Image (cartoon, helix red, strand yellow):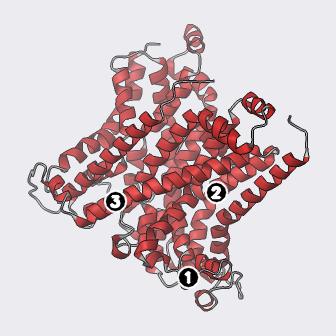
Amino acid sequence: MKGRWDKTALGKQVAALTVLITVSVFVVAPYGWMLLTSFKSTREIMQNPGKLLPIDWTWSGYVTVVTKSPFFSWLVNSAIVSITVTVAVVFTSTLAGYVFSKFKFKGKTALFWLLLATMMVPYQIMMIPQFLIINEIRIYDTLWALIVPELVTAFGIYLCRQFCDDIPDSLCEAAVIDGAGPFKIYRMIMLPLLKPCIGALSIFTFLGIWNEYLKPLIMLNEVKRMTLPLALAFFSDAHTRDIGAIMSASALIMLPATALLLVLQKQFIKGIAITGIK
Amino acid sequence: MKSKWFVWVVLLPIVILFTVFMVLPIAGGFVIATFDYNPLRSGNSFIGLSNFVKLFSDATFIKSFKNTLMFVFVTVALNITVCLFLSALITSLRWSKLRSLFRVLFFMPCVAPLVASSTVWRGLYSPKYGLVNSFLENVLHIPAVNWLGTPAFVMPAIILFTLWADMGYNIILLSAGMDGIPSDFYEAAEMDGTNALKKFFFITLPLLGRTMSFVVAMTLISHFQMFAQFQVLAGRTGGPNQAGNVLTYYIYKTAFQAKDMGYASAIALVLFAIIMIVTLVQQRASRVDWGY
């Protein structure tokens, strides 16, 4: 059947492509509109609402973002939090996944189930006590408030355990006979074999933290300590009338994640398919 | 393997962090819900189930409860239908480069921070300079609508945005599922002269059972917890006539603006209960006991 290009098959391909291209136009349109609008002055946006292309291309929106707000502090804050959490989550998840998969100890099943059970609970239930605890240990309104609670995630541990279960026990047993300790086995055998899992876990942890809005909204207050998504909400409230600047800020914030996707497309698609991350 | 010290060294810090930031807060959520709790006050009294009783006479709660259910069911139904259709089209393409191109394209909105993309959409919906209205007026010749300012249109506007923002995940998962269906089924059907529509409904859809069940569950759970687009698109007041207010946003406002944390926890528990019930019902309904 495959490979034969009769007329109906070709027609079907063309029809499918037409629909997909039309939908794609609608999917991409907001990006195009955002970029084009970000290069207009706000006066032009208000006076020529029907016109797509800027009449006078201007960087003034971007200049406003960079000069009238601590944009680079926000960028650095976001980078610090996202990178620290990603590295930590990969480390804690792979170690704990390895321990749950390859070691025997008392209370293992109960502890693992407790871990899984917390994944079912919506953040709205724990956010209030979490806020009170953060306040109590005096890290409210610091980047630590966004880092410390995220160092360990049930999902990461669960994912790494699944992948460790697929690595044969005999590999570890052989290493034990050769005199390798548990940490050496983790470093020399588990970590290299967990690479696809680590790839997916780091991409999605990074992205999740980079995009997080509700937690920073609760845990931060000072403007210069904000991370990008929270900062954008703050910025667009402070410059309500300056549409050009708001679109420039949005573009600057959407850019890094979109670039990451375009560079790592294969890893992204594979990552979602193997982990079912949502 | 057995190594007591290693298990301890690894799990102790993890268990401590996990207890302090997950287990305690969850338990705390249940406890605080039975208190009249305001963090700015020194004495907070135990009031039993009063917070839950108050829910029944709270018009804003009832409105956001209904809005949440409406939003989740309509968005998820549309999302799954559209994603199934698009995934089937993508899977039918013969050139694998094109298949990956469309998957990445549809996934693009998923990686953008929801606050940023909803801020862009607030501009798109603007009655003064938005693209949506100029498209309606100039291309489709339909009169313009004040999307975010009219009670009847706020929720549809948010639903459309959410569809755009979240389809990518399901398209990737569903089209991966469709790729996994053995082609013998389709070849057999083609011998019998079955058309594309029948193939979709009698082969693809039933054989996608497991993936579908997972996708529907994850989509339901994530949509119940969406927050950012409601704050940005419906605005700080919950939209005109509260038409864009949902439980997550009402919980946030009650807890951190009104500082009524006991009551907010009670609403959060209701949200949890709905998610549990809906997920259980969905899992029951889509139980699959076969394989290929």
Q: Secondary structure at mark 2?
A: helix
Q: List x then y, in percent, for residue A271.
A: 62, 40
Q: Nearer the viewer, mark 2 or mark 1?
A: 1
Above or below: residue A260 compared with residue B135 = above
Mark 3 belongs to which amino acid?
Answer: Lys
Report if the CB atoms under discs 2 and 1 are less than 8 Å apart.
no
The residue identified by callout 3 is: B66
Packing grade of label 2 (10 A; few <14, some 14-19, many >=20) is many
How far apart marks 2 and 3 lie (CA) works out to 31 Å
At label 2, the amino acid type is Met
In the rendered image, residue A126, in percent from the top left (x then y), is placed at 31, 48
Chain containing the residue with disc 1: B
Quarter of the rendering containing residue A175 = top right
To which residue does mark 2 refer? B108
Residues A42 and B145: in front is: B145
Q: Quadrant of residue A170?
A: top right
- Kindly report which numbered mark, 2 or 3, lies closer to the viewer in this rendering: 3
As drawn, A39 above or below A221? below
Q: Which residue is tagged 1?
A: B144
Disc on the earlier residue, 2 or 3:
3
Q: Is residue A45 visible?
A: yes
Quarter of image, res A176: top right
Q: Is residue B64 above or below residue B197?
A: below
